[in-house]
Image (spheres, helix red, strand yellow):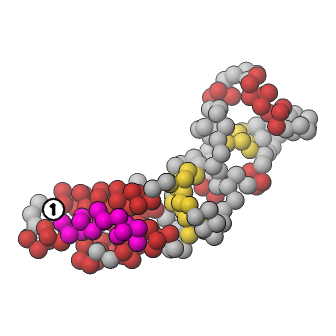
């Protein structure tokens, strides 16, 4: 979620409107995306956290375009009158954002920032082995009592089973799910 007011009131925003530089634009994008977007160098791919799992972002340039289009729209709508100079600057900024190469340069700067860059990420790692990622939560059987909970960003979950929490909670004995569990967890102690 973009805090439009905070961003368009910032020094970086004013600096960006004045010079349309990719470094400044990348700083703004980092501020917006730092908690939900990563670039994994080993994969050469971008991912965003959708509140539950990490999903590949197939078009980071499009994401940059959408962010800056939204900010420019907010900026122009909240100011009732502009002088000719400011109007020309805003138009020039929008023209820059529309350029594929410009957005590509922003993505390069964004991807290399410490808040976004990750050399490697082990998605669905062994650290989450006593859990299963469902469509809308996590089935955690790391203790004697099975729990349903939310996932966290730090778990780097990506693969999801085709079950919802309520499907399992309310199913009594969920036969399809138990068949899946028995097929994948051969140790009978795991299933107790």
Q: Residues within 10 Å of mark 1 (few under 14, many from 20)?
A: few
Q: Quadrant for the C terminus, please.
A: top right
Residue at x-position 60% and y-position 68%: 41
Say whether residue 64 is magenta.
no
Residue 107 lies, in percent from the top left, at 44, 67
Task: Name the residue at 84% across, 32% down.
Answer: 182
Q: Nearer the viewer, residue 40 or 181?
A: 40
Residue nearest the observer in this picture, 112 or 129: 112
Q: Where 135 sits versus 98, above or below?
A: above
Label 1: which residue? Answer: 79
Q: Which residues are magenta?
A: 91-106
Residue 66: x and y in percent read 34, 56
Residue 28 x %, y %? 38, 69
Which element carries disc 1, helix, strand or loop? loop
Q: Quadrant of residue 3?
A: bottom left
Majority secondary structure of the magenta segment? Answer: helix
Q: Is residue 6 visible?
A: no
The residue drawn where x is 46% and y is 71% is 108
When the figure is inspected, residue 128 is found, relative to residue 119, above or below; the finding is above
Residue 102 at what x, y percent from top left?
Answer: 35, 70
Image position of 69 (left or right of 163): left
Residue 100 among those drawn in magenta:
yes
Q: Is residue 110 left or right of residue 147?
A: left
Outermost residue on the right side: it is: 188
Please tell me whether residue 188 is drawn above or below residue 81 in the rendered image.
above
Splitting the image into 4 quarters, where does residue 77 fall?
bottom left
In the displayed structure, does residue 56 sit left or right of residue 26? Answer: right
Total marks shown come to 1
Residue 144 shows in this picture: yes
Residue 135 to residue 125: above or below? above
- Left or right for 136, reference 10: right
Q: Quadrant of the N terminus?
A: bottom left
């Amino acid at each position: 979620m973009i805090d439009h007011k905070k961003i368009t009131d910032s020094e970086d925003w004013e600096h960006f409107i004045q010079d349309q530089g990719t470094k400044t634009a990348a700083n703004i994008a980092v501020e917006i995306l730092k908690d939900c977007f990563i670039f994994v160098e080993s994969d050469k791919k971008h991912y965003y956290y959708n509140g539950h799992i990490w999903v590949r972002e197939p078009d980071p340039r499009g994401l940059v375009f959408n962010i800056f289009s939204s900010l420019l729209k907010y900026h122009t709508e909240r100011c009732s009158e502009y002088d000719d100079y400011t109007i020309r600057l805003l138009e020039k900024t929008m023209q820059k954002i529309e350029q594929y190469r410009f957005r590509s340069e922003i993505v390069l700067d964004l991807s290399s920032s410490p808040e976004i860059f990750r050399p490697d990420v082990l998605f669905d790692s062994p650290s989450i082995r006593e859990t299963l990622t469902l469509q809308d939560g996590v089935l955690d059987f790391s203790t004697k009592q099975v729990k349903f909970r939310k996932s966290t960003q730090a778990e780097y979950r990506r693969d999801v089973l085709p079950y919802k929490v309520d499907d399992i909670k309310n199913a009594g004995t969920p036969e399809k799910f138990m068949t899946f569990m028995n097929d994948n967890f051969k140790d009978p102690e795991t299933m107790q």
